[in-house]
Structures are given as C-alpha cells and as structure tokens.
Image: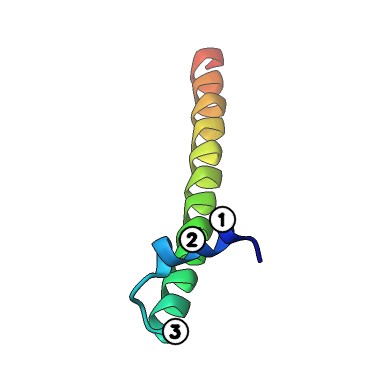
C-alpha cells in the first residue's frame, strides 16, 4: 500500500471503528446504486414525454 493511499484512508476513515467504516462503505455503495437508478428513471421519463408529445402532435 502506498503512503498516499494510507493517508487518504486515514482522512476518510480516521477515528471510525471497523464496523462504522464498513457501514459507511455499504451506504456509499447503496447511494451510488440509487443514483444510477434515478438517472435511468429520469431518462425513461424523458423518453416517454417525448413519445407522448409526438402522439399529441399527430392527433
């Protein structure tokens, strides 16, 4: 492990217990998963809006 990695790890997880650090990592992973889900749903919503606008224009 490089010294830079060790310093970064200490800055991020400094005074935490191992269980707290593990929980933080789990929450960060869940947050990333939820952000991807929101992005996917936002794109789906935009596509559906564009499709529905096309139907309204042709009707």
Q: Are marks 2 and 1 in contact (CB under 8 Å)?
A: yes
Instruction: Measure the alpha-carbon separation of dots 3 and 1.
Output: 20 Å
Give the quarter of the image for residue 51. Answer: top right
Picture disc at residue 4: 1
Q: Above or below — where is 28 with respect to 16?
A: above
Residue 45 rendering spot, x and y as whole percentages: 49, 38
Q: Residue furthest front?
A: 3
Residue tagged 2: 7
Residue at screen point 49% across, 64% down: 9
Q: Does 13 appear above or below 44? A: below
* Callout 3–callout 1 Cβ contact below 8 Å: no
In front of the other: 6 or 41: 6
Query: Callout 1 environment at 10 Å: few (<14), some (14 to 19), or many (20+)?
Result: few
How many labels were placed on the picture? 3
Q: Earlier in the sequence, mark 2 or mark 3?
A: 2
Q: Which residue is mark 3?
A: 18
Disc 3, SS: helix
> Which residue is rendered at x = 56% and y = 55% of the image?
4
Give the CA separation, mark 2 to mark 1. Answer: 5 Å
Residue that extends furthest to the left in the rendered view of this protein: 15
Q: Nearer the viewer, mark 2 or mark 3?
A: 2
> Are there few (<14), some (14-19), or many (20+) residues within 10 Å of tag 2?
few
User: In the depicted view, which residue is nearer to us: 1 or 34?
Assistant: 1
């Amino acid at each position: 492990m490089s010294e830079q990695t060790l310093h970064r790890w200490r800055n991020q997880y400094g005074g935490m217990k191992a269980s707290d650090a593990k929980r933080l990592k789990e929450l960060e992973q869940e947050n990333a998963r939820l952000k991807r889900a929101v992005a996917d749903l936002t794109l789906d919503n935009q596509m559906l809006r564009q499709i529905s606008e096309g139907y309204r224009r042709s009707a």
